[in-house]
Image: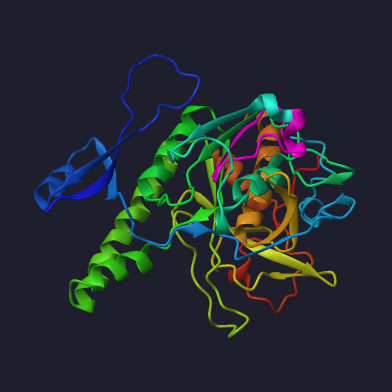
Amino acid sequence: MKKEHVILRRAPHTGAPRAHPPTPTLEVKGLDRKEKRELQNDPSVLALAPAASGAPTVPSPASTQAASEGPPQGMQWGVKAVGADTSPFTGKGVTVAILDSGIDIDHPAFHDIKDRIVQQDFTGKGNGDTGTGRIAGHGTHCAGVLFGQDVDGRRIGVARDIEKVLIGKIIADDVELAPARMAKAIAWAAAQGAHVISLSLDIRLLDGMMTDLAANMPPAIALSKALIGYRDTLRFFEQLARQIEPCVLIAAAGNDSLREADEDWEAAVNLPAAARNVLAVSALSFRDNVLASWHSSNTDANVSGPGADIWSATPMPERWRRRNGTSTATPHVAGVAALWAEKLRKEDRLDAETLRNAVIDSCTTRGIPEEYDAHDYGAGMVQAPQS
């Protein structure tokens, strides 16, 4: 029986100079076992993975709260926590991409940057951020955190002077977010010249695969096949992240931990954040001048960002929403990466490895009690360049 796989091939070499790195070739195709083995031995194939995970793929925030009064005057705490308020850099000359549920481009937070936003729909539902339930306003919120402009004396955005914004809509109501769709959007953003890609979505691959497989086979066999699918998908995203360099992919770790019930109930980073060459982001909260891991944030991420009680834009007419989770932490980190990209670009040393290292090396553990587990926050809270 043939099963759909997404196939990643090396980008063709034309010999002609390009403004952006060659785009790898992605193909979705039904394969039987023999065809899969043949492709695994094909030198032009970098990786292949199941095209549809069957997993419950959801936005990372675990809770939201709407309020008519909106965020407090001044700035939301995350902007200050990452040092964006004192940085001389604003994201000028940098292209960023947000792959999510779309954007409400008519929100006041995007009025002054509206002509720099390019939208691309990968769901078949059309551009805009029109979802319901947990995905409602998710992309708009992340966009506000990363590059939103000041509204009514409130600052919500980390990098407010981005040169170009790419909005890839990859999740919508009744549309499964399989690895194939996510991969196509990542490749699109890289081909459009993104320096930084912000991805506040995660794939709980093992959950879905085990549920599907265990219905038709013994549990031990189902587990083995699910692990193979996870391994192949992990390798796929590792190769994809390498192929899109000098673009840097920044992804949410996920919110599956249950620290409030038991401090040892911690979940590991989900895909695609778990892949090598992807910068995985955990979430920190701030109370009584103490930084702590947000209780649901997955462990073993590379870096952390502000991820609790974060106010940002949400589609009109509501305007504002407060969210928690690694989804809100990720655009903070992506915004800081954009500021570092501006600095490195001016110094003529911008490449993926240098940018990733700059973001990681910027991190501080100031404000995090020494007794806290470093696995929960990685290198620490990311910091914007100050000179």
Residue 53 occupies quadrant: bottom left
In the displayed image of the protein, which residue is found farthest to the front? Answer: 317
336 with respect to 40 (left or right): right
Residue name at image x 26 percent, y 72 percent: 223
Q: Is residue 24 above or below residue 177?
A: above
In the displayed image of the protein, which residue is found farthest to the bottom? Answer: 262
120 with respect to 68 (left or right): left
Q: Is residue 252 above or below residue 219?
A: above
Span shown in magenta: 91-112
Quadrant (top left, top right, bottom left, bottom right) of the N terminus? bottom left
- Where in the figure is residue 93, as x and y percent of width and height? 68, 26
- Where in the figure is residue 201, as x and y percent of width and height? 52, 53
Is 111 a magenta residue?
Answer: yes
Residue name at image x 60 percent, y 83 percent: 263
- Where in the figure is residue 319, as x and y percent of width and height? 75, 47
213 with respect to 174 (left or right): left
Residue name at image x 49 percent, y 64 percent: 269
Q: Which of these two is toward me, 331 or 342?
A: 331
366 with respect to 273 (left or right): right
Q: Is residue 346 above or below residue 73?
A: above
